[in-house]
Image (spheres, rainbow, N blue to C red):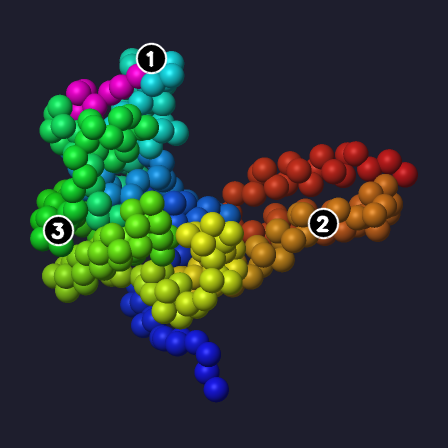
Amino acid sequence: MNFRTEFTIPVSDWKLALDSSIVSMGSCFAEVMGTRLQHYKIGGSYQPFGTLFSPLALFNLLSYALKSQEMDSRLFLEREGQWLHYDLHSSISGKSKAELSELITIKLLNLKETLTRAQVVILTLGSAWAYQLNDTPVYVANCHKQPARMFTRDLLSVKAICKEFGAVYSLLKEANPSIRILLTVSPVRHAKDGMMDNSVSKSILRAACHYLVTDYVDVTYFPAYELLLDDLRDYRFYSDDLVHPSQMAEQYIFEKFQQTYFSPELSQFVKDWDKLSKALNHRPFQQNSPSYQSFLEKLKKDLLRLPVDVRAELAEVETRLQNIRF
């Protein structure tokens, strides 16, 4: 008897390698995936402007970067002694408007440079609900705890999302003709919207992804949303807030991602790195012993064989070796 509805994800005809460069942006689930990709030494730019839920927010930032444009000067604000921007997460801040503006400029330049050499852009869409700043009026990425009366809540349409994507797609292909776009819908439930409004939002995002994959040959979709809601489909795969996936669910989804998009060489490196990571985290009962010294010497040799930058890990091993006292 089967108690789960497992489904097969078609193996991708393109693969990520250890030397691939990735740009990953979007909801908090994008941060989860990005953290794991970074752990496996895959370079790129991960959440450079913080957590962003709206597709329009993602498209706007990509457009700003690719056009080398300054961000909307009307959308700076000061809150509790920190300067913020309505198009960015609150983790991107400055002590002054000038400081924040300079930080944004640097981040946009870095994003553009990464986009020109990246193999893939991963965009994780979080919500189709958007907030328009009444005074401007434009859609914003973050309300930054400002009074609700300053905003109008709106539901984006599938057509609007696809239209805005088309504009930024052209910019991406002009800057990097070989780049691919990987879309995914965040499995995180937006409980604050209410379950009915959350369902409407997710259905719009999923429909938009369907049409974009249909219309663009180098746009693909990874079913993170379906893996949690249709495959795992149980509250034991949620964290205590019953909104975010548990660590077990995150690992399961990442393994499916790996099986779909990792080259055989990268998959082998993942296995090797998992073993070395466990060794790096190992703390013996007797740290001042010949056996622990031999363990560290072997670990050092294993790290030196890897085709990636492991200077930080090697420095840690060297420090442990120097601290051994018989």
Decide which of 16, 94 is in the foreground and name it.
94
Position in image of residue 294 (x %, y %): 79, 50
- Sequence-first disc among 2 and 3: 3
Q: Please state which amino acid type lies under the numbered disc 3.
A: Ser
Name which residue lies at 36% across and 75% down. 7
Give the percent coordinates (x, y) of residue 250: 46, 57
Q: Residue furthest bottom?
A: 1
Residue 96 bears which disc, if any? 1
Is disc 2 surrounded by few (<14), some (14 to 19) or many (20+) residues within 10 Å?
few
Mark 1 vs 3, N-terminal side: 1
Q: What residue is at 19 percent from the left and 56 percent from the top?
A: 204
Q: Which residue is mark 2?
A: 282
The magenta stretch is 69-78
Q: Is 70 included in the stretch rendered in magenta?
A: yes
Against 247, is 77 above or below? above
* Left or right of 218 on screen, residue 235: right
Left or right: residue 322 compared with residue 232: right
Which is closer to the viewer, label 2 or label 1?
A: 1
Q: Magenta span has 242?
A: no
Identify the element where label 1 is drawn.
loop
Q: Are marks 1 and 3 in contact (CB under 8 Å)?
A: no
Is residue 93 shown left or right of residue 307? left
Q: Which residue extends farthest right?
A: 326
Q: Which mark is residue 157?
A: 3
Q: Which kind of residue does numbered mark 1 sit on?
A: Ser
Q: Position of residue 152 (x, y in %)?
A: 16, 35
- Residue at image location 10% in from the left, 48% down from the top: 160
